[in-house]
């Protein structure tokens, strides 16, 4: 799906929902939830398509899991059905949001990432010999982003009412400790939706070359 500006409408056709499913499924292990959804895939996608186009889609709850990857992370995981919607929104948002980001935003972008950010940092350190690097992290970024700030950022970028209503449902679906928060980090739509709100500080590692004038901030996961 190609999107060129913020006047584009989100595509909730069955074909595009199928593409969102394929993009979501690619590279994932076959969990019990995914296997169950796949067992009646055609019906599940048809029902989802009908709900999205009738305006009757309701986002479900989250299951909470603990993952130990270098450090303990408490993550909230939506149902497979809802994660297909997240992927649909992700594919819609990226072409809108990504061109508006600063070149030196390195988090969750195609062709970017941690290793590219480090290489960029090395080049700038060579160019500016007196520069220094500060690495920092915003604790529990997605648990603490203000929903109203996030909505304001989204509304500046998008005019399609269907997309905005769907984003509102996803944003409203999650609260941390009974405090409304943005979508949990385990879901892809949270990345492009929150990037405008998180500039210049990203949810990941922040590399600040303090002596540089314009190119002063690089962010990466």
Image (spheres, grey):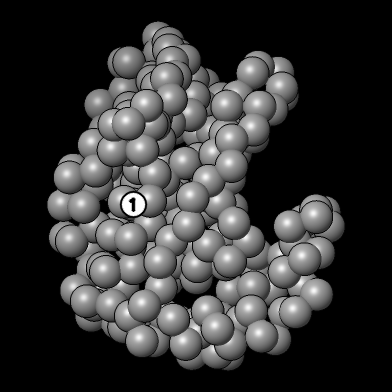
Residue 16 seen in this snapshot? no
In front: 158, or 110? Answer: 158
In front: 181, or 32? Answer: 32
Q: Residue 7 is drawn in which quadrant?
A: bottom left
Horizontal and vertical percent for residue 74? 57, 27
Horizontal and vertical percent for residue 115? 64, 34
Residue drawn at point x = 53 percent, y = 46 percent? 62
Residue drawn at point x = 58 percent, y = 66 percent? 81
Q: Report the number of numbered marks.
A: 1
Quick check: 169 above or below 108? below
Quick check: 35 above or below 200? below
Horizontal and vertical percent for residue 98? 39, 58
Q: In which quarter of the image is the C terminus?
A: top right
Identify residue for label 1: 171
Horizontal and vertical percent for residue 126? 52, 21
Quick check: 160 above or below 50? above
Residue 39 in the figure: left or right of residue 112 = right
Residue drawn at point x = 44 percent, y = 81 percent? 51
Q: Residues within 10 Å of mark 1 (few under 14, many from 20)?
A: many
Residue 20 in the figure: left or right of residue 198 = right
Residue 204 seen in this snapshot? yes
Residue drawn at point x = 29 percent, y = 31 percent? 179
In front: 189, or 201? Answer: 189
Disc 1, SS:
helix
């Amino acid at each position: 799906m190609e999107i060129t500006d913020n006047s584009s409408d989100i595509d909730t056709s069955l074909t595009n929902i199928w593409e969102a499913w394929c993009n979501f499924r690619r590279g994932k292990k076959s969990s019990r939830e995914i296997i169950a959804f796949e067992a009646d895939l055609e019906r599940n996608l048809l029902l989802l398509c009908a709900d999205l186009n009738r305006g009757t889609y309701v986002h479900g709850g989250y299951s909470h899991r603990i993952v130990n990857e270098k450090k303990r992370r408490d993550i909230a995981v939506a149902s497979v059905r809802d994660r297909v919607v997240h992927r649909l929104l992700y594919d819609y948002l990226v072409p809108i949001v990504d061109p508006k980001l600063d070149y030196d935003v390195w988090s969750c972008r195609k062709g970017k990432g941690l290793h590219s950010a480090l290489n960029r940092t090395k080049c700038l350190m060579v160019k500016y010999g007196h520069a220094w690097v500060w690495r920092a992290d915003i604790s529990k970024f997605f648990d603490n982003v203000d929903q109203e700030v996030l909505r304001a950022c989204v509304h500046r970028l998008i005019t399609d009412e269907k997309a905005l209503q769907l984003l509102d449902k996803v944003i409203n679906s999650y609260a941390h400790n009974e405090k409304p928060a943005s979508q949990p980090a385990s879901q892809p739509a949270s990345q492009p939706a929150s990037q405008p709100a998180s500039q210049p500080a990203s949810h990941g590692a922040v590399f600040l070359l303090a002596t540089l004038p314009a190119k002063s901030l690089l962010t990466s996961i």
